C-alpha cells in the first residue's frame, strides 16, 4: 500500500464584506459573499477573521463557521454567532481592516485584507477623503471642528463691493492670474492659476475653453482643478462674465468671485460664487496643503441638458479628487447647494479618523495590494490604485459577472511603488458596457486579487 497526500485545490475567490451601512457605536452581524470562479466542490471549510486596527470588538459565541464552497457559484455566509461593535470613538470616513482567512483542516485556501468603510450617513457628516487626504466639510457639519462658516466678501463694485482686479471674460474664455503667495495643492506648489469663465480654476495653466463639465476624477478636462460651479455659463449680446480677484492681506487669503454669471440653461438665472484660497499663515495644515473654500451667494443648479454642474476638486494626475456633486448626484455627506452654502476642502482629518492600514506610507509599498476603486459605484470613470513592493509585470483585467473578459486595462512592466489607472466603462473595442457588476483582477508575479465594481448609468 502507498500513502500519499491529496493537495487542496485553492479556489479563485472574490469576497465582499457586508453589510454596507455600518456606523460608529453600532452593532452588526458580519456577512461575507463569495464568488467562486473555480471548478470542484470544496467541503467543510472554516472562515475566521481578525481586525488589525483593533477598533472593532466582536463578541463570539462560536468562533468557527463551516460551509462548503460550491463550484462556479456565489453564496452569502452570515456569521450569526458574531456580534460586532464599531467603537463610537471613530469618525465617519474611516476605514477598518478585516483580515479574512478561509481554511480546510490546516491548509489556508484564502487570506486577504478587506476594508470596512464607515461611510457618511447624512449631509451633516463630512465627505470621505481622497487617497491623498483631502476632505470636504460644509457649513451643516456642526460636529466637526473644520466646519466652515459662510463668509461672503463682495468684490463687484456694482453691488457695493470692495473692488479688486476685474476680468471681463467672454463666453467660454479664460485668464491666467498670478497668486499673491505660493499655494500647495495635492503636494505640489503653485504660484499661478487659470481662471475659466465656466466656473473653475486650474493650478496647471491651460487653454481649455470648452463649456462641457465632467465627472471628478476624469481623464478629460483641466488638471489640478477647483470647481466651485463648473457649468456652461453664458454672456448675452455684448455683456461679459465678470470675474474679480482680491488679495485679502488682513486674513491672508486670495478671493476669486464670479459675479452674476448667467446659467446657459435659460440665460436668465444668475450664479454668484467664490473661491477662497488660504495661505498657511492663516490656516496651517500638517501636510502643508492649502485650505480651499467655496462660498455661494446665489446659486441654482438647473442645467438639466448638460449634466447640471460639477462641484469638487481634482489632483494634477486626474486620478483622484472629491466629486461633491455631479449631474445633481451628491456624494455621501454633501449638503445640497444653496444660498449661503460654504464648503471647505482641507487635509485636516476629523478627530478619531482611522486611515486604511498602509495608506499613510503607501509610496513605501511593503506588499502587493489592489486598493479600493474610487468612486465605486461609478459613472462613467473609476480610478484603480495598486501597490507593488518590487518591479513586476502587472496585468489588470475587467470581467463581467459571467466571468467573460471585458477589457485588459494593463499588461506591462511596472516599477515598485503606488500606481493608478482608470476604467471608463468600455470594452476592448472602446464601446460602452452595460450597467452592472464587474470584477477587476490584478495579477503580478504569484499575487492575484479580485475586486468588485459597480457601473451605474
Image (cartoon, helix red, strand yellow):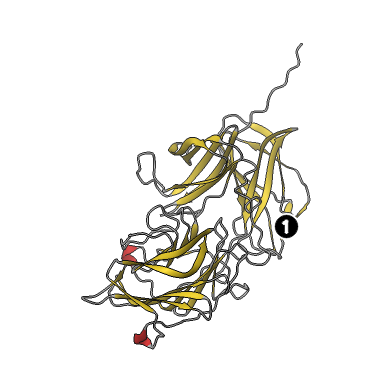
At a point 41% along the width and 47% down the height, the residue shown is 425
Residue, disc 1:
55
Taking the spot 33% from the left edge, 66% from the top edge, the residue there is: 174
For the residue pair 273 and 78, the one nearer the viewer reads as 273
Percent position (x, y) of residue 298? 40, 79
Q: Is 361 left or right of 438, judged from the image as shown?
A: right
Which residue is nearer to you in this view: 34 or 424? 424
Image location (x, y in percent) of residue 396: 50, 39
Q: Residue 205: tell me if it is visible.
A: yes
| Left or right, 186 with reference to 168 | right
Question: On the rendered structure, is 107 left or right of 36?
Answer: right
**Residue found at the very far left of the displayed protein:** 237
Residue farthest bottom in this picture: 160
Rendered view: 2 above or below 81? above
Rendered image quadrant of residue 161 = bottom left
Q: Is residue 311 visible?
A: no
Residue 148 in the image: x percent, y percent? 55, 75
Left or right: 414 with respect to 357? left
Give the vertical position of 268 relative to 385 (above or below): below
Tell me: residue 449, above or below residue 335. Answer: above
Count of numbered tags: 1
Q: In the rendering, at what x and y percent does residue 394 appear?
A: 52, 36
Mark 1: give few (<14), some (14-19) or many (20+) Cα within 10 Å.
some
Dot 1: element: loop
Q: In which quadrant will I find the C terminus?
A: bottom left
| Frontmost residue, 175 versus 333 | 175
Instruction: Please give the name of the residue rendered at 57% of the width and 59% of the height, measured from the top-left corner.
Output: 133
| Residue at 63% across, 73% down | 145
Quadrant holding the N terminus: top right
Amino acid at each position: 500500500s502507498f500513502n500519499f497526500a491529496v493537495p487542496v485545490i485553492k479556489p479563485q475567490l472574490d469576497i465582499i464584506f457586508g453589510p454596507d451601512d455600518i456606523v460608529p457605536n453600532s452593532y452588526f452581524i458580519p456577512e461575507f459573499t463569495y464568488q467562486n470562479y473555480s471548478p470542484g466542490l470544496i467541503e467543510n471549510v472554516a472562515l475566521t477573521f481578525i481586525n488589525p486596527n483593533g477598533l472593532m470588538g466582536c463578541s463570539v459565541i462560536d468562533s468557527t463557521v463551516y460551509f462548503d464552497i460550491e463550484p462556479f457559484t456565489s453564496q452569502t455566509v452570515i456569521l450569526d454567532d458574531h456580534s460586532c461593535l464599531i467603537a463610537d470613538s471613530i469618525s465617519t470616513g474611516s476605514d477598518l481592516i478585516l483580515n479574512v482567512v478561509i481554511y480546510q483542516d490546516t491548509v489556508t485556501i484564502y487570506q486577504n485584507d478587506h476594508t470596512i468603510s464607515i461611510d457618511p450617513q447624512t449631509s451633516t457628516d463630512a465627505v470621505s477623503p481622497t487617497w491623498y487626504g483631502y476632505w470636504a466639510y460644509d457649513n451643516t457639519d456642526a460636529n466637526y471642528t473644520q466646519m466652515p462658516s459662510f463668509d461672503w466678501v463682495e468684490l463687484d463694485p456694482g453691488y457695493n463691493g470692495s473692488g479688486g482686479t476685474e476680468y471681463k471674460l467672454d463666453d467660454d474664455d479664460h485668464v491666467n492670474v498670478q497668486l499673491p503667495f505660493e499655494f500647495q495643492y495635492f503636494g505640489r506648489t503653485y504660484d499661478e492659476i487659470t481662471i475659466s469663465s465656466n466656473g473653475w480654476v486650474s493650478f496647471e495653466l491651460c487653454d481649455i475653453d470648452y463649456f462641457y463639465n465632467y465627472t471628478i476624477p476624469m481623464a478629460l478636462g483641466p488638471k489640478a482643478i477647483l470647481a466651485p460651479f463648473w457649468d456652461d455659463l453664458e454672456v448675452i449680446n455684448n455683456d461679459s462674465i465678470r470675474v474679480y480677484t482680491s488679495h485679502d492681506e488682513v486674513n491672508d487669503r486670495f478671493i476669486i468671485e464670479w459675479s452674476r454669471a448667467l446659467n446657459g440653461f435659460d440665460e436668465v438665472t444668475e450664479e454668484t460664487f467664490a473661491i477662497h484660497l488660504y495661505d498657511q499663515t492663516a490656516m496651517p495644515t500638517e501636510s502643508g496643503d492649502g485650505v480651499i473654500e467655496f462660498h455661494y451667494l446665489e446659486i441654482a443648479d438647473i442645467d438639466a441638458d448638460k449634466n447640471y454642474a460639477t462641484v469638487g476638486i481634482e489632483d494634477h494626475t486626474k486620478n483622484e479628487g472629491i466629486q461633491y456633486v455631479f449631474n445633481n448626484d451628491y456624494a455621501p455627506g454633501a449638503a445640497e447647494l444653496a444660498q449661503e452654502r460654504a464648503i471647505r476642502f482641507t487635509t485636516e482629518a476629523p478627530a478619531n479618523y482611522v486611515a486604511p492600514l498602509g495608506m499613510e506610507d503607501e509610496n513605501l509599498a511593503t506588499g502587493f495590494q489592489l486598493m479600493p476603486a474610487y468612486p465605486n459605484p461609478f459613472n462613467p470613470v473609476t480610478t484603480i490604485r495598486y501597490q507593488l513592493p518590487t518591479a513586476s509585470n502587472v496585468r489588470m483585467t475587467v470581467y463581467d459577472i459571467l466571468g467573460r473578459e471585458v477589457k485588459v486595462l494593463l499588461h506591462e512592466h511596472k516599477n515598485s511603488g503606488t500606481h493608478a489607472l482608470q476604467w471608463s466603462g468600455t470594452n476592448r473595442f472602446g464601446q460602452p458596457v452595460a450597467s452592472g457588476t464587474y470584477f477587476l483582477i490584478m495579477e503580478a508575479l504569484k499575487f492575484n486579487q479580485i475586486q468588485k465594481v459597480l457601473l451605474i448609468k
